[in-house]
Amino acid sequence: MIDAAVFRRVSLFSELEAGELEALSRVATVRQYPAGATILREDEPGDQFFVLLRGEVKVFVDSPDGREVVLTHLQTGEFFGEMALFEGETRSASVSSLTDTELVVLARPDFLAVLSRDFSLTRKILATLSSRLRKANEVIESLALQDVGGRLARYLLRLADESGKAPVDGFFVVNRPTHQEIANSIGATRETVTRMLKQFEDRKLIRVKGQTVWVPSEIPPGARENEWRRR
């Protein structure tokens, strides 16, 4: 049985009562994956729910021409695999680990049983799904209406909002994914991403050192991507 204290480290479970946490610890399992491991594959049966205790994963689909399209990155405390459980359908995307990763895993009947007993958990999951849908709409809009520079600017700003360290001197500090991963996320080639990042750096829109990028925090929301292109 998993120590119930494990679940208290995850915000998703923070409002559960002690008895509910104990019940959860009896039915959940913990799995560990090395960096680069495949956790889920698109179109396979979906009968488990996953919560990240430690590490980072990417969620992606394969395009008809064989390219990998990254939908999002998820970090400690976030979850995935819920859509197939709600729908009773196959997985809509693949998931692989970007770092050494530790996951809490719940089978479908146990996951649905917990939701039926505690609305606070249901509310958090619905709020997260709503946020993800909003982000998906932003990505679709970006791919349809913006050039590569605008898409890259929006990607970096979103990365800063989601995982950047608190602003210092007007900049978020962000651990940058590889150029190929960025290209897969914004519908561009690796070469184009490399060139655009260098242009942003030359124009002092960002600062770059190795895998670390300093992304500006002072540009007003809603006008930020256009502002980057005008400078």
Image (cartoon, rainbow, N blue to C red):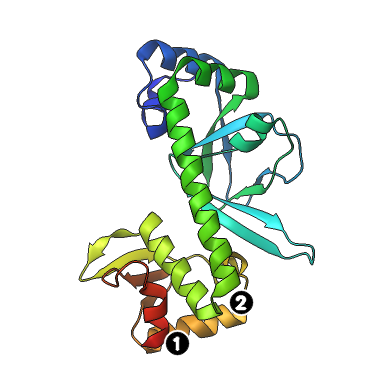
Left or right: 156 as drawn, with respect to 102 = left
In the rendered view, would you say 110 is above or below 11? above
Q: For the residue marked with disc 2, what is the amino acid?
A: Arg
Residue found at the far left of this picture? 169
Q: Secondary structure at mark 1?
A: helix
Residue 114: give x, y in percent of width and height: 51, 18
Residue 62 x %, y %: 73, 58
Q: 87 left or right of 212?
A: right
Residue at 36% over, 73% down? 223
Q: Residue at x 44, y 26 (%)?
A: 121
Depth check: give the residue in front, 46 or 28: 46
- How far from the left and from the top, in percent, is residue 126? 48, 35
Tell which circle, 1 or 2, labels the residue nearer the N-terminal end.
2
Most foreground residue, 31 or 173: 173
User: Which disc is residue 120 wearing?
Assistant: none
Placement of 26 over or under 77, stated as above or below: above
Which residue occupies 64% across, 77% down?
189
The residue pinned by badge 2 equals 190
Going by the image, does 61 lie left or right of 31? right
Residue 99 in sight: no
Residue 47 in the image: above or below residue 155: above
Please state if 213 lies on the left or on the right of 35 as rendered. left
Q: Which residue is mark 1?
A: 199
Does residue 26 show up? yes
* Kind of residue at disc 1: Gln
The part of the image, by quadrant, that contains residue 221 is bottom left
